[in-house]
Each structure stands twice: as structure tokens, then as C-alpha cells.
Image: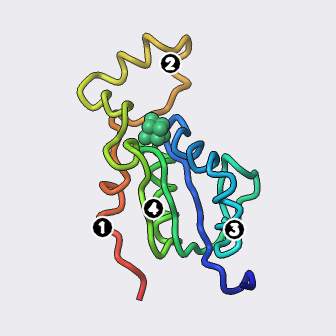
Amino acid sequence: MTDLKKPKVGIWKFTSCSGCQQVLLNCEDELLELAEVIEIANFREASSIQLNDKYNISLVEGSITTLEDARKIQEIRTKSKILITIGACATAGGIQALRNFANVDEFRNIVYAKPEYISTLSTSTPIQEQTLNYVDAP
Ligand code: SF4
């Protein structure tokens, strides 16, 4: 199969421990076989190369916890024909969603020596909540 015919796949990270990407990376032999039929065009855990392109499929790890996350997921959604969430962070907000039931400013002040440098949202939301209003381009 030539590169022109291979579906382009992007694997994206938002707020997470990167464990879901590690599981994919651990499928070493299977990944090599997959690379025969798909083009992995973006996979931060595996390569620093990032193509700014359209994707047939995007796999998304992590939840939305920063303004940058919220902006980036919209961009990735518009560039992806199919978007699939992987793991508890992306599908339900993950362990970081505990902040949804507490005061995130309190946490920030306890954890960081210079909390004023930490920019974060007060919530951690699953990917679906950020992309529900997406309408596929005609
Ligand atoms: S769901 Fe979230 S916490 Fe669990 S392994 Fe994946 S990235 Fe890590």
C-alpha cells in the first residue's frame, strides 16, 4: 500500500499521565504491522515530528483542564474525520476531575510554591463535553 492511500492517524495528549499512550507504544510488534496500512502522523510519545494536517482518525488521551487544552481540542476535532477517546481521563475526566468537587485555587496554593504562575481551569472535563457541538464539514 502506498503512503497516499494510507489513512492518516493522529494520537493526541491532553491532561493525563500518558499511560494510555504508553500502552499503545508497548504494542511494538503490532505497531510495526499497523504502520504498513496506516500513517501515524502525530504521536508525541513516539516521535517529535508533528504534522499540521487533516486526520482520518484521531485517538485522544487526557481531559481538558486548561484554556490551551480547550482551544486545541477544537482544532483537532475540526481536523479529524473520526475522533476516538482512549482511557478514563478522556472519557470521564480522570483522577484530575476530583477538582470538580473541590476548590482548585486551594489546591494550587497548597501544591505550588508560586501558584500565580499556574494557569488552569477550575474543572476537568471529558473530551466529549468539549466536542458535542461539533458539526462535520460538508
Ligand atoms: S486513563 Fe488517564 S490516568 Fe489512566 S492511564 Fe490513561 S492517561 Fe493515565
User: Which quarter shows the C terminus?
Assistant: bottom left
* Left or right of 80 on screen, residue 31: right
N-terminal-most mark, 3 or 2: 3
Q: Measuring from the top left, give residue 79's x and y in whole percent.
A: 53, 71
Disc 1 from disc 3: Cα separation: 32 Å
Q: Measuring from the top left, give residue 73's x and y in whole percent.
A: 47, 57
Colour setting:
rainbow
Amino acid, disc 3: Ala
Foreground mark, 3 or 2, reads 3
N-terminal-most mark, 2 or 4: 4
* Left or right of 73 on screen, residue 94: left
Disc 4 from disc 1: Cα separation: 10 Å
Q: Measuring from the top left, give residue 131's x and y in whole percent.
A: 35, 62
Secondary structure at numbered mark 4 = helix
Mark 4 Cα-neighbour bin, 10 Å: few <14, some 14–19, many ≥20: some
Circle 1 residue: 133
Q: Residue at x 35, y 24 (%)?
A: 104
Circle 4 residue: 74
N-terminal-most mark, 4 or 3: 3
N-terminal-most mark, 2 or 1: 2
Q: Which mark is residue 115?
A: 2
Question: In the figure, residue 56 lies in which quadrant?
Answer: bottom right
Q: Residue at x 34, y 49 (%)?
A: 91
Amino acid, disc 4: Gln
Q: Which mark is residue 35?
A: 3
